[in-house]
Each structure stands twice: as structure tokens, then as C-alpha cells.
Image: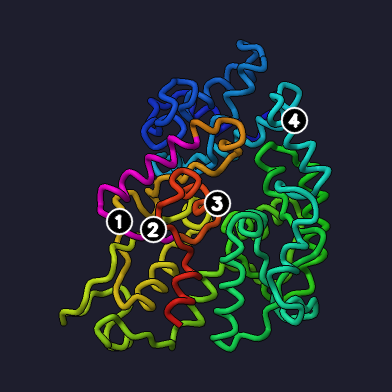
Amino acid sequence: MNLDRFKKEISYCTYCPKLCRFACPVAEAERKETSIPQVRQEILHLVRAGRLPLTPEIAETFHHCAFCLHCRTYCQHLIEVPAVMEEARGQAADYRGEKARNFLSRYNADGTPFGPRLNERINELIRAEKRVPEAQAVYLAGCTATKYRPGNITDTEKVFSRLGIDYVGFYAEEEFCCGMPLLNFGEYEAFKARAGKVAKKLSRYKLILSGCPACVYVLKVRYEQFGIRIPGKVQHITEFLDEKLGSWEARTPGGQKTSEFEAGSVPASPRPRLPAIFYHDPCYLGRYLGVFDPPRKILARVLGEPAGELFWSRQDSICCGGGGAVPLLFPETARKITARRLEEFGRKGGQLLVTSCPFCERNFQRQDPNIPVKDIVNIVLEKL
């Protein structure tokens, strides 16, 4: 395998005393050495040195990574193991298992991870006048929200309407998927081809918004890494709404205006308690994009008080289990990761779990259909 551009990362990890062991959700769920980020890097070191043959069993270890980036939080050298695993998966393509091969075959045929013509669902959800291609800005819903969280999309359109934002259209082009699933398997040539088509469609807009952190990361960071530039500004919906809600005043359950105190601080005067609402930081929005405060500021503003903080939050947030193709390849591992995240929410007496990622929302409710999970846009719409 030719992984020369990651020589430093692989070497550093090979001789590290597994400081990332407890930070990896996959290792915590599977409880085996080969799932630890350091060990996976050491395996790559041995394969590169010719001391270990590349076999289907060895190639499978590269897929035991949720791409959550939590290992970096505890790495003095800030090694990004997911980037190495991504390329290793691509170089070990000949050793892929049947699930991965079948998924990629379907994806390449349909253009999305959830079947053909997914873009047509936007036409059903959003009024025709809101799908104007010549709009100044565009909202890209993403595949997961379109398939599993359509309410997020319609609520976003209603929020725009109530805030008087009439210049954002909704993306419904045939080139609908940003290409993230291809990156999960290191399919770089196919990804570059898809990214070029999507970027061409998006290049007419001054502003591209999305409620999917993974889409934002891919459009904003990964496209540029492949030499594909989108001229417009790319933002997650929470960054945009944080700006637009800056002068908006809600009333708290006690009748106070939120402007009567600083967003993020707790007023001294007593008032009725809200349900125990906790915010979950998605991996791509938080660790990858560094967006931690805008969602919290929005919640503090519209709720009248800060949402509760889980112990594992911000840079230390526990993955929902939805990344890196883990749910597809190792569904039991994904379920265990999700259960670990929800366990703390339950112990804290949580009554509502709020996040800003359709992947997370889908995984939480797939684990427990009865758990109350909402997206931030759902909360904002309720309070407007």
C-alpha cells in the first residue's frame, strides 16, 4: 500500500501508548485491540513495511472507524486517524466485503445512498416558488434529512418565511448528493467526478446553507482539497440562524423577553422550569467544523435559558454511531455506540434531546423510537 503522505501519522501512532483507546467509540463498543485507532495505524505500518500481508481480514480493520475524530481530542500531535483510514479503505478496495461492494454499486447507479430520484422528494415537500434556481442563496437538505427527517426541511422553510427571509431557494437538482458516501470508502476518482457536477450547480449561489453538518464539511473543506471550488459562502443552518436571530426576542415561560438577560446566562428571577432539554454536539459540526456556540446561543435565545449540557460534550462529545459507514457494515457496533450516547441522557433525566444533524437524529430514534429527539430548527419554529 502506498500511504506515503500519511507516513508521519502512521509512524507516530505506531509508537504511541494507545492514549486514544478510551476516546474511540468503536473500540469501546467492540472491546478488541484491532478496533483501537493506534492499533489500526500500527497494522498499516506493518503492511507498508511488508511485514504483514494485506488480506480481507486486515482490510476489514480499516472500516472499524466511525470517522468521529474523537481520538484527535486526546492526541498531542493532533493526528487525524479517519483521514488515514479513508485512504486505506480506498487502496484496499480489492478486499472489500460484499456489503460495501453492493452499497457502492447501488450508489453509483442511483446517485444517492437511498435510491434514485431522491431530489424529487424536495419537489413534494417544498412549494414551487421556493425552488427557484435563480435565488441568491440555496438550502441543500442532504440525503439523510430528505429520506428520514423531511420535517426538518419543511420546518426550515417555515422558519425562513416567518423571519422574512425570501431569498433562499431549495436545492432539488438531479446532482443531489454531495458525494460523502464515496469518501467513506476512499473512492476518490468517483468523488471528484461527482463533486465537480455538484459544484457546477451550486456555483451560481452566493450562499449555500445546509442542515447536514457532513454536507457542509464536504462542500466547504473536502471539495477544496480536491481542487474544486464553490465561490459562494457555505454555512450550517445554525450559523445562519444565529446571525438572523440576533435581534429577535422570544418570551420565556415566565413572560420575560429574552433580551432582559444575556443569552447563555440564567436569569436570577424564578420562573417555571422548562423540560430537561439537552444538546448533543454532532461530530462533523463540532470537531470537524468547530461550530459549538451557535446552536447553544440559538437554544438559549428561543428557550429563554441555556439547554442542559451532557458531560461528554463539545470536543468531547460522544459519537451517535452514524459515521464512517459503520451502521452499514457493523450495525451491532453502531447500536452499541448510540446506546452509550443515550445512556447519559437517560441518567440525567433528559426529557428532550436536541441536536443539529439528521444522522444523529436518525440514529437516536432508530435505537429507541420513543426517545424525544428534535432538530434545532424544530425548536426555533415552535418558538417563532
Q: In the figure, is residue 140 to the left or right of 322?
A: right
User: In the rendered structure, which segment of residues is drawn in magenta?
Assistant: 334-354
Residue at the image point whose x is 32% and y is 66% from the top: 307
- Marks 2/1 in contact by CB < 8 Å: the verdict is yes
Mark 1 → mark 3, Cα distance in angstroms? 20 Å
Q: Which residue is mark 2?
A: 353
Residue type of the residue flagged with mark 1: Gly
Which colour assignment does the render follow? rainbow
Q: Is residue 32 magenta?
A: no
User: Is residue 218 visible in this depiction of the protein?
Assistant: no
Residue 336, label in figure: none
Q: Is residue 137 above or below residue 50?
A: below
- Mark with earlier residue (1, 3): 1
State the residue position of label 3.
359
Q: In percent of the image, x 71 and y 55: which residue is there?
A: 178
Residue 349 lies, in percent from the top left, at 25, 54
Rendered position, 305 above or below 103:
below
Residue 350, label in figure: 1
What SS does tag 3 mark? helix
**Percent of width and height locating residue 352:** 36, 60
Quarter of the image for residue 298 reads bottom left
Q: CA distance from mark 2 to mark 3?
A: 14 Å
- Give the distance between the C-alpha atoms of the residues marked 2 and 1, in whole angstroms: 7 Å
Type of residue at label 2? Leu
Q: Nearer the viewer, residue 211 or 353?
A: 353
For the residue marked with disc 4, what is the amino acid? Arg
First in sequence: mark 2 vs mark 3: 2
Residue 142 appears in view: yes
